[in-house]
Image (cartoon, rainbow, N blue to C red):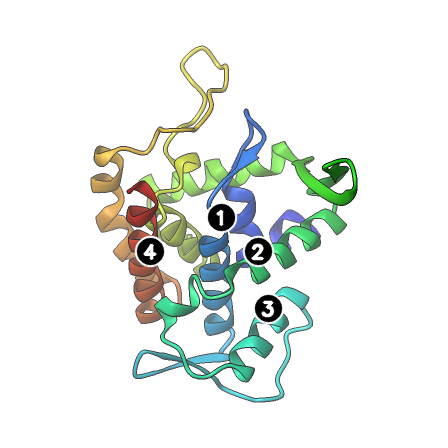
Amino acid sequence: MPHGSLTLPARLHLLAWDTVTGEIAGAAPLVRAGALTELAQRGLLLDDDGIATPADMDALTDDPVLDGLLELVRESRPHRWRDWVTLHARVTADAVRQQLTADGYLAAERRRVLGVFPAADHVLRRADVVRALQEEARRTLAGPLTAVSAQEAAATALAAAADLPTLAAPADGDGREESYEGRVDQRFAERVGGRVEELAERSGAAGIVRELCAALRATAVAAEH
């Protein structure tokens, strides 16, 4: 999967990686919000008075992650957009992780739990791609929006709304990278607040992205307490 062809949920999963520690945390709601947004951008999920509603009961995207979410929405009772950000979000996050592993961005390291049960830890293989995506998102937060695509606008808006630490901490002054852990503070949140609204307007699904951003903010606040 070339860098430029990453889906929105795959892009957000990679944005959430700390390239120094090799760790990722709290990505499931963000990845789910990305999948919902891309389906809305493609016209496959519509907004019906705040309810995420399939536009067509048979249409597919040929992407297993997006099609899996479409099937889940179709087979479930109606839910508001913000409910879908967390409802069974691990299903989408796990599917994205499998996709990124198959495409070489991640690697699965096998282990056994309690020496018996097989399991796998995923490690980042393409830190160069992740750093490029993070730098692009920082430029989008700070620079002109004239050439920003709908996908990049949506990705950056959602990541900023989720208080993603990797957007707030580039390499330090002497060129050595620092861990992003704990780098999001009130000043960052205040600085990007207005920008999130501008980016939502460029996303091609402004009302839906605003709703998802609000849900991600609430989820981030709840995780802090």
Mark 4 and mark 2: Cα distance apart in space: 24 Å
**Kind of residue at badge 1:** Ala
Quarter occupied by residue 53: bottom left
Q: Is label 1 in a helix, a strand or a loop?
A: loop
Provide residue 93's location: percent of width, then percent of height: 57, 55
- Nearest to viewer (mark 4 / mark 1): 1
Q: Is residue 151 left or right of residue 4?
A: left
Provide residue 55's location: percent of width, then percent of height: 49, 86
Residues at discs 2 and 1 in contact (Cβ within 8 Å): yes
Tell me which numbered mark, 3 or 1, is placed earlier along the sequence.
1
| Depth check, front residue: 153 or 18 | 18
Residue at the image position 36 percent from the left and 29 percent from the top: 182
Query: Residue under circle 2?
Result: 93
Quarter occupied by residue 169: top left
- Nearest to viewer (mark 2 / mark 3): 2
Q: Is label 2 in a helix, a strand or a loop?
A: helix
| Depth check, front residue: 164 or 146 | 164
Q: Residues within 10 Å of mark 2 (few under 14, many from 20)?
A: many
**Kind of residue at badge 3:** Leu
Q: Is residue 26 left or right of residue 63?
A: left
Query: Residue under circle 3?
Result: 66
**Kind of residue at badge 2:** Ala
